[in-house]
Image (cartoon, grey):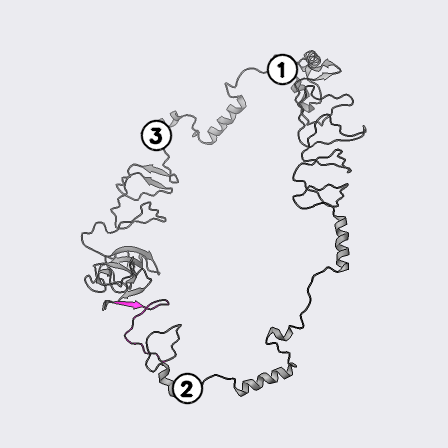
Amino acid sequence: MPSWKKIITSGSSPNFSQVTVDNTVTANAFSGIFQGALSSSAQIKTQISGAFTSTSSSLASRITTAELELSNTLISGSGQIATAISGAFTSTSSSLASRVETNEGYLNQSVKTDASPTFVGLTTTGDVTVQGTLTAETYIVSSSVTYMTQSFSSGSTIFGDTSDDTHTFTGEVILSGSTGLNVKHGNISGSSTSTGSFGHILKGGVNWDTAVSASAATAGFGTGGSSFTAAGISGSLGSNASVIRGLTNARISGSFTAASSSLASRITTAESELGNTLISSSAQIATQISGAFGNQRVGTTDNVTFNRITTTSGTDVFGGNVTIAGNLTLQGSQSAAETLVIADQFGFFASGSTTPIDAGLLVQSGSSAMTGSAMYHDVHDAGTVRNLNGGRWAVAKDVKADDVSTTPKAFVTTVVTATDANDPDGTDVHYGVGEMYVNSDGEIWIYTGS
């Protein structure tokens, strides 16, 4: 594998024939024998004598000094403090027993979370949250205002106990009883914008519907749609009172079939000011219209769709979008677009060439017109290690828009990701010098061509 060079990275497993190190070598573990390294005690047996079988005089002296300075209180075993530990906690003191007995007298029932205790009374200065059902033989709320989110009561219910009590309801009041709303004393009142809908109203035992119907007929409101008279309209109608009272069905008739003299005069004036070019019908321009417009506008700012565009001479300019249902074939040497959107997944270049040629993308760079940097497929030096298989991706500068070939400044590095742990060989070279190879173990190689 002479053409592939392995790149050594952290975690790599290199295989060298020889390594020369000028400084320290550090590793968690070594295998084998280094030149000059210690491999067994036999190499230093003449430098080792004696054995560590007893305490040295120096260590014994330092321990003796420490025991004297600590008054011989240095504990080396539990036997030194065995006599200092005695007795056991076997009985409760009288003070603790008295306090426990007192607390037992205060608590004569379980108050655990799963218990159901009974209390003579309950007073709290904070909130009380009941997650179950609250049952009370007598429910008294001592407050100037009572708020209830939801309350149910079986049987008759009384709100208030004196005639000056006020009960305010926000929202709708729905009555489902058979007698509806029965007001024994007082009045029902509302603001000027209040509305009401009733199925039946009794006042003093009299059917109020019948009474109102009779008085309405007297006032001129019958069942004939617009058959009302001026006498039936009362109240303040403002400055247009006389006009409104005069609008009966007999006063409204006819239809708008002809222009008023005022409107006709204004149209005549507009025609005169416009040189009589005001178009009132297609007959005025009938001789100037030929053919048909189809089903779309073709103005300079319109989006248009054509089945085919044919240009015989000159330049066609569209200010809007142009959609072509078929293929677009450009036979000119250059084509320009401010924004080019291609729906195809691949762009196909140099399709008319029968032999391999340089082709790719060119981007304007620098101040020279129609000159820039290219990323393209280079086909020079085919059959060499630089471009082994007849073409590879490259980049170049100062390429003109009408150039048919160029010289690469650099090649694009391609990477082969192998599915096995094998080292690369000649069959893994696809483009040439500089391409990389990574096997499944993460080992990295670069192709040098030699």
Q: Report the side of 75 relative to 111 (left or right).
A: left
Element class at badge 1? loop
Residue at the image point whose x is 28% and y is 39% from the top:
326
Answer left or right for 442 relative to 166. left
Q: Earlier in the sequence, mark 3 or mark 1?
A: 1
The alpha-carbon separation of the residues under discs 2 and 3 comes to 124 Å
| Distance (Cα) linking label 1 and label 2 | 136 Å
Q: Quadrant of residue 117?
A: top right
Q: Which residues are magenta?
A: 4-22
Q: Secondary structure at mark 3?
A: helix
Give x and y (percent) for residue 296: 36, 33
- Per the image, the residue denoted by label 3 is 288
Would you say 429 lies left or right of 238 here? left
Image marks 1 and 2: residues in contact by CB distance under 8 Å: no
Is residue 397 visible in this depiction of the protein? no
Q: Nearer the viewer, mark 2 or mark 3?
A: 2
Which quadrant holds the N terminus?
A: bottom left
Q: Residue at x 77, y 59 (%)?
A: 95
Q: Tag on residue 48? A: 2
Tell me the residue that label 1 is attached to: 248
Q: Relative to 208, say whether 412 is above or below.
A: below
Mark 2 residue element? loop
Residue at 37% in and 35% down: 297
Whether 17 is among the magenta residues is yes
